[in-house]
Image (cartoon, rainbow, N blue to C red):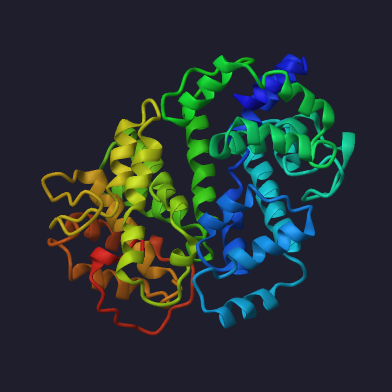
């Protein structure tokens, strides 16, 4: 909304407005890629760190150092916090430059994968460049930065300030950063609707969960089956990029789930829905801190409760999408168990259909046969043997039998010594 209004004030061409529309919608698709880096640099909950970072002027060294002191291992003892600060390679702004580079480059790559043209990808690559050259990732300045990138840089910052601190502070921030972060002409365009009460009322409605339609400035993309599959695949990569321990997890779970379904004689239409649900089943993990996902030790009760919320987040993310009703239900049920000991709803066998059961088996199998921060990977044979202990109780024996028959699904890794993991399968998959 904010970016398009600025683009209209600047009288951009139809193509530029369309580029701005799509770039603004998917500009943050690379954010999961830098979660590990930020958590590793600062410690603590990187979700809180990322939220606070948005209000810091990183071009000011004093502000950057003050932020690092405040947010580096905030809950740790003073000595541990000091040690973490001393471990930083250079000033805090250098860590943020690296994180920004990762985000923007990954976002541009995802835009191309989704079929958008180079103008959309370039705008996303440029969205954290600053007018004075002190931005990232390429340290461009002035008119070296694409016009759409210059608008996005301002729009994303103004929108957050207005939402969190009010319109007055948002426009004060623009005045302070004009000519440094932001193109002065783009600032002037934003000032043109500072007192437009109707516009800002609509903005408040969006923030409050009462969205009004935002008119598309060009020709809307046609949601073909292939386009939907491409979006699902791209966002599976977004999810899997969040943690080094879940790289390619969604694609492997999808492969296993589809193969099990084919083995069980399920038809093409149902398999298509299952495939999309499998690709997106962990999208709710974007709302879980890497401090928890990458923790090398056992999770405490509070941390495990945080993990258990991610299927609910998956449901909340996918449920507003038209036509995704069935896909949403399958995806959000991947941690449910036949005996009701799963989460987040505590469903039982009477509630779980075939696709839900297949996805649960595929997810557990991949979790067991992949390395995690708290344990080594299991061999396929050991994983299936462990799963048979729960067959008929928490997981579906028919789905497990189909998995066992699929010898071609063995992960491409060297055989490891047999390791016994006396862990209930209720806790395996997301953890």
Q: Is residue 47 above or below residue 193?
A: below
Figure quadrant of the N terminus: top right
Identify the residue at image location x=66%, y=38%: 157
Residue 259 shown left or right of residue 25 in the figure: left
Residue 69 picture location, percent across and down: 64, 67
Residue 127 picture location, percent across and down: 72, 40
Can you see residue 153? no
Residue 99 picture location, percent across and down: 67, 57
Give the total number of marks visible in the rendering.
Answer: 0
Pick whichever, 89 or 419, lies toward us. Answer: 89
Pick whichever, 279 or 431, lies toward us. Answer: 431
Quarter of the view holding residue 370: bottom left
Identify the residue at image location x=77%, y=50%: 136
Residue 370 shown left or right of residue 148 in the figure: left
Residue 429 picture location, percent across and down: 34, 61
Pick whichever, 422 or 35, lies toward us. Answer: 35
Can you see residue 78? yes
Q: Is residue 348 above or below residue 108?
A: below
Figure quadrant of the C terminus: bottom left
Q: Is residue 130 above or below residue 9?
A: below
Identify the residue at image location x=86%, y=46%: 133
């Amino acid at each position: 909304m904010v970016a398009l209004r600025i683009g209209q004030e600047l009288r951009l061409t139809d193509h530029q407005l369309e580029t701005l529309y799509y770039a603004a919608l998917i500009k943050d698709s690379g954010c999961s890629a830098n979660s590990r880096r930020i958590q590793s640099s600062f410690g603590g909950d990187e979700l809180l760190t990322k939220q606070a970072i948005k209000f810091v002027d990183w071009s000011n060294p004093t502000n950057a150092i003050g932020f690092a002191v405040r947010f580096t291992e905030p809950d740790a003892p003073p000595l541990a916090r000091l040690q973490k600060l001393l471990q930083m390679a250079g000033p805090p702004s250098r860590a943020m430059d690296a994180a920004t580079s990762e985000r923007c480059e990954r976002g541009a790559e995802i835009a191309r994968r989704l079929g958008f043209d180079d103008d959309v990808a370039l705008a996303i690559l440029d969205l954290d460049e600053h007018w004075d050259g002190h931005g990232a990732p390429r340290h461009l300045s002035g008119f070296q930065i694409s016009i759409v990138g210059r608008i996005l840089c301002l729009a994303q910052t103004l929108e957050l300030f207005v939402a969190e601190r009010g319109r007055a502070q948002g426009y004060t921030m623009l005045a302070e950063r004009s000519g440094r972060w932001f193109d002065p002409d783009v600032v002037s365009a934003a000032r043109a609707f500072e007192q437009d009460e109707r516009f800002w009322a609509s903005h408040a409605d969006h923030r409050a969960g009462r969205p009004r339609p935002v008119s598309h400035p060009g020709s809307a993309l046609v949601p073909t089956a292939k386009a939907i599959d491409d979006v699902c695949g791209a966002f599976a990569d977004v999810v899997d990029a969040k943690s080094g321990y879940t790289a390619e997890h969604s694609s492997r779970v999808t492969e296993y789930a589809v193969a099990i379904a084919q083995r069980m004689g399920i038809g093409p239409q149902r398999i298509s829905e299952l495939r999309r649900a499998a690709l997106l089943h962990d999208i709710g993990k974007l709302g879980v801190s890497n401090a928890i996902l990458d923790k090398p030790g056992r999770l405490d009760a509070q941390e495990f409760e945080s993990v258990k919320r991610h299927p609910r987040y998956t449901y909340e993310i996918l449920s507003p999408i038209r036509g995704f009703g069935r896909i949403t239900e399958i995806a959000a049920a991947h941690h449910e168990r036949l005996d009701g000991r799963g989460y987040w709803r505590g469903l039982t066998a009477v509630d779980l259909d075939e696709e839900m059961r297949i996805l649960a088996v595929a997810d557990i199998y991949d979790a067991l046969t992949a390395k995690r921060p708290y344990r080594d990977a299991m061999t396929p044979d050991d994983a299936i043997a462990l799963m048979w202990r729960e067959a008929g109780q928490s997981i579906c024996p028919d789905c497990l039998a189909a998995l066992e028959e699929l010898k071609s699904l063995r992960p491409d890794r060297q055989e490891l010594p047999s390791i016994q993991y006396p862990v209930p399968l209720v806790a395996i998959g997301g953890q």
